[in-house]
Amino acid sequence: MTDTATTAPTPAPDIRKGLAGVVVDTTAISKVNPETNSLLYRGYPVQELAAATRFEEVAYLLWHGELPDAAELAAFRAAERAGRALEPNVKAAIDLLPTTCHPMDVVRTAVSVIGASDPAADDASPEANLAKAERLFAALPAVVAYDQRRRRGLGVVPPRDDLDYSANFLYMAFGEVPDPVVVDAFDVSMILYAEHSFNASTFTARVITSTLSDLYSAVVGAIGALKGPLHGGANEAVMHVFDEIGSADRVVPWLDEALASKRKIMGFGHRVYKNGDSRVPTMKAALDTLIAYYDRPDVAELSDALEREFVARKGIHPNLDYPSGPAYHLIGFDTEMFTPLFVASRVTGWTAHVIEQAASNALIRPLSAYDGVDERHV
Ligand code: ACO
């Protein structure tokens, strides 16, 4: 008797390149809704948080799930102030790095040094991880501020305890207390950058956490993922585009050439939002206040002209990096420092996700479909 049974062909695997559209887990930290163009942090619309709270309160919210009351905020602010100064070993490590390296390499190295000097680095309890998150939150502004200053041939500006997070950050970077208009716009950018569900860098942090590695390693990996221009590096790239174009009257010929050579225009497009980034109107309003404050209508003209022309041609809308790049430029940051500013903010979201992942862990280990040469023998 012959065996007429045939083996059923193996179904083609359902490959989702870039994990596009794949839901890999639940999260209670933020909700991105592209249909309603909304972003909620722990249930609160990010626009309301930007209008009514400071970045310290948002950091607390992301970690604890609730906004702090007055006593909790005072205690949290006191702890943040106590951790602001640039630690000598971190400064020494930064000083070893050439100023030719990208500032993202510096901030990544600084987090490694901070982690290596923490005796509780491998304690993954929620309390220990929260303490590490707060430590990085407090320490990173000094790292970013000092790195910009040393690249300009300037020394450390010690923190000031009478200033809140954003005012002190700008003070450490520029050596003077900025106008409240500038502080407010910067604080809004910090709030908007803080959290955005399973974006590439946050997912990286969760993958690293899922192996039971430590929080510092997760943040170092996340910084590496954020550096790329398809993700956080876009705020820096937007400024390069503005520099390249020069002025509003050059937008059309520049765009003709850029699109003909199939260039991606940085600051436009988003994997999740297809009809506009929920954070853009709030950041655009903050940019407008800076444009008025610094009396730079040329920035508005160029930004508006490029947006108008690109949206008309491609139907692709700006993302948060589009208004935040020129905002950081107007405040006075060097272009290469823009993505480290994003790190100082997003470290809150990353660490909230590390704590969430650790609390309900499953090793993140997807499958792949092999398409190399058939089995062969040596
Ligand atoms: N410029 C030109 N074309 C674009 C852009 C852009 N910025 N964004 C998307 N497109 C086009 C693509 O070329 C592609 O066209 P095609 O179908 O004809 O090949 C189509 O739109 C789909 O784009 P993908 O890159 O496949 O879509 P994806 O969802 O992967 O892209 C991404 C999302 C990576 C953000 C993309 O829009 C991009 O590269 N933007 C520029 C970089 C950027 O601004 N990143 C910041 C992200 S937001 C943040 O990190 C805060």
Image (spheres, rainbow, N blue to C red):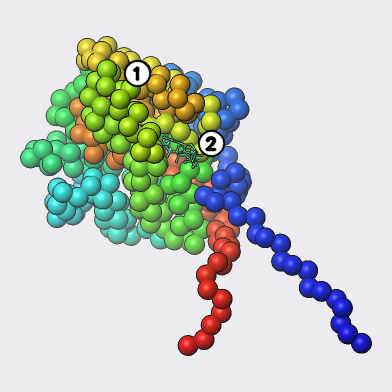
- Total marks shown come to 2
Indicate yes or no: mark 2 CB to ligand 1 under 8 Å.
Answer: yes
- Callout in the foreground (2, 1): 1
Q: Residue at x 45, y 52 (%)?
A: 204
* 241 lies left or right of 260: left
User: Residue 337 in the image: x percent, y percent?
Assistant: 24, 38
Q: Residues within 10 Å of mark 1 (few under 14, many from 20)?
A: some
Q: Residue at x 45, y 51 (%)?
A: 205
* 122 lies left or right of 251: right
User: Residue 22 in the image: x percent, y percent?
Assistant: 60, 47
Where does label 2 land, which residue?
A: 272
Q: Which of the 4 image quadrants contains residue 187? A: top left
Secondary structure of the residue carrying numbered label 2 = loop
- Give residue 146's mark: none
Q: Nearer the viewer, residue 7 or 175?
A: 7
Question: Which of the marked residues, 2 or 1, is nearer the chain's N terminus?
Answer: 2
- Give residue 305's mark: 1
Q: CA distance from mark 2 to mark 1?
A: 25 Å
Vertical placement of residue 213 versus 266, above or below: below
Q: Nearer the viewer, residue 166 or 97?
A: 97
Secondary structure of the residue carrying numbered label 1 = helix
Given the image, on which type of amino acid does mark 1 rest?
Ala
User: Residue 272 in the image: x percent, y percent?
Assistant: 53, 36
User: Residue 148 in the image: x percent, y percent?
Assistant: 17, 39
Given the image, on which type of amino acid does mark 2 rest?
Val
State if disc 1 and disc 2 touch (CB < 8 Å): no
